[in-house]
Image (cartoon, rainbow, N blue to C red):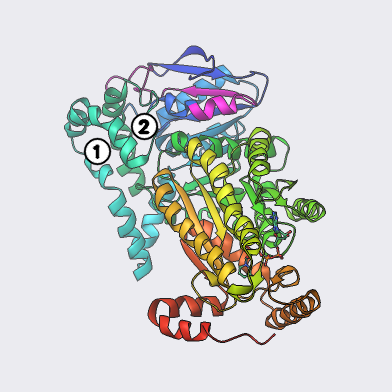
Amino acid sequence: MTGVEARERRVRTGGVELCVAELGDPGAPTVVLVHGYPDSKEVWSEVATRLAERFHVVLYDVRGHGRSTAPKPLRGGFTLEKLTDDFLAVIDAVSPDRPVHLVGHDWGSVQSWEFVTVRRTEGRIASFTSLSGPSLDHFGHWIGERVKRPTPRRVGQLLGQGAKSWYVYLLHTPAVPELAWRGPLGKRWPGLLRRLEQVPGDGYPTPSLPSDAAHGAWLYRDNVRARLRHPRPDAYAHAPVQLITPLDDAFLSPRLYDGLERWVPRLTRRTLTARHWVPRTRPDRLAGWITDFVTSVEGGRPGAERAGGGPYADRFAGQLVLVTGAAGGIGRATAYAFAEAGARVIAVDRDAEGAVRTAEMSRLVGAADAWAETVDVSDAQAMEKLAERVHRDHGVVDVLVNNAGIGLSGSFFDTTPEDWRKVLDVNLWGVIHGCRLFGARMAERGQGGHIVNTASAAAYQPSRVLSAYGTSKAAVLMLSECLRAELAGRGIGVSAICPGLVNTGITGTATFVGVDAEEEKRRQRRTARAYGVRNYPPEKVADAILRAVADNAAVVPVTPEARGAHALARFAPRVLRALARVEPRL
Ligand code: NAD
């Protein structure tokens, strides 16, 4: 294993010899990682080294793969029953007295579903984390129900999954897959993985790939048709299951897992924006979720309890989320929304007390953990130090919300260079610093992420009294669009949020230029009253922010007036220009 000493042993079972590797403290809870097709145990190397800090990690090459020997003859040598024998032989050797935590990817997950739903392994499996590989029995029932009671939606689901399964039909043809894998496909596969799946090229796949893939074709031939035609009626999981679903999986539709609760009484769901080979592309996230799940099961609190609540718990639980301007308004509501979903939240604001309060409340409403940081986002050096601190203490941020901002209203000619500097420093430079410092680390990690920038409807809706504020927000909108284009290839999404009038404290602190202090106070009060009457709650903007991250939305106008102005900007810009001339009565 890369970077960590693995201990190896051979386990004999059913006429084959399995190559088993162990990492970490044998006294700690055992996590067994089962690889898929066409892979060997090395697909887990990045996840295994991370898990080995806390657990006894065990990996083995499935029969016929890597350095395990192949059954003779191959036909009939890869049935789920035989694979279950192998699994039992491995855990007898590595953890005879204590149930293990099972993790499977792809075919490793398909076979693990068998392990966790047959009676003879009962009491031997403490938990199961499934990645991109359904139970063939559940799949068989899923197909059967849709064929028996076809509605247009169900037929669509069948056709959708049918199209994603093209390779399964190919693997059932005799000899062709073997010839392809031992020939051109075997040579081109590493390049294809890099291009299509964004798998980093770091010593994976191993040179055994052509023979792994040729042998592994029998996994399909020995099991798929038989099980899909005659799925077991009693394939109930006897251990808690954590289902991790990559949403951009080219081979499996997330719909396959609809109704899985019927088979799995203790189910925790997780989703992430990623393609199929998550053990290579998202090792940090997987190791985090596996660690949380195993720890909660070991602590007698099977999964779901620690998973956070709300509609986005499956997506954000355990993720590291940093929100600027989190001491009030939209930022605070956003911190709470991520906290409710079980995220780890860093609340950043120049208002120290407010940030601490947000962090405390975040913990109370469900955050896996929460911290406060006092920083002025316009201060480049302070932001640099913040990024270093966060990286050192908590790791790479998964979701960054550049939200801190200030308001300024009045005539262009009354706006001094100092006023301009203030607005641009916070509203634009604050966002630039955030994107540069946290975005760079996200990109460098190469495991995806998301950046949210709070712009405003003022980014596309001109106004005679918002030249400085509108300019700062238009710049944030364009920065977000450009960055989105640049980072798309690295799995990092960028969203610009464009709220209209939202009832927050911003009106009370906004600068009104061209008037004396007393008049400024009066205007602040009047605007605050108007926003209060409009009464659009910041919680709804927070909701829109979580949805934008989950859906990787590019530009999100929030509030009806912001959506209306967005439509006008596209289809009737002259109307917006006419409205821009109207002087607001304050
Ligand atoms: P708010 O005043 O309630 O909250 C803003 C927070 O940012 C405050 O806690 C403040 O202390 C913090 N902040 C300000 N300058 C900072 C700095 N230099 N460094 C660190 N923190 C700083 O305002 P809000 O309405 O929640 O605004 C949040 C974002 O939404 C802003 O970018 C704002 O421009 C934008 N927005 C607000 C509205 C609205 O109607 N409220 C509409 C569109 C866009």
Identify residue for label 2. Answer: 79
Out of 515 and 381, give the one closest to the viewer.
515
Residue 311 sits in which quadrant? bottom right
User: How far from the left and from the top, in percent, is residue 489?
Assistant: 38, 45
Q: Is residue 574 above or below residue 566?
A: below
Residue 514: x %, y % from top left: 69, 76
For the residue pair 557 and 519, the one nearer the viewer reads as 519
* Residue type at the position of mark 1: Leu
Residue 533 location, quadrant: bottom right
Check disc 2: other Cα within 10 Å, few if <14, some if 14-19, many if 20+. Answer: some
Specify the principal SS of the magenta part: loop
Hey, what amino acid is under mark 2?
Thr
Q: In the rendered image of this protein, does residue 20 appear above or below residue 136? A: above
- Magenta-span inclusion, residue 183: no
Asked if residue 245 is positioned above or below residue 34 in the image, the reply reads below
Stretch in magenta? 46-73
Q: Taking 561 as reference, is 233 left or right?
A: left
Which residue is tagged 1?
171
Image quarter for ligand 1: bottom right
Which label's residue is closer to the chain start, 2 or 1?
A: 2
Closer to us: 214 or 418: 418
Would you identify the image quadrant in which residue 532 lies?
Answer: bottom right
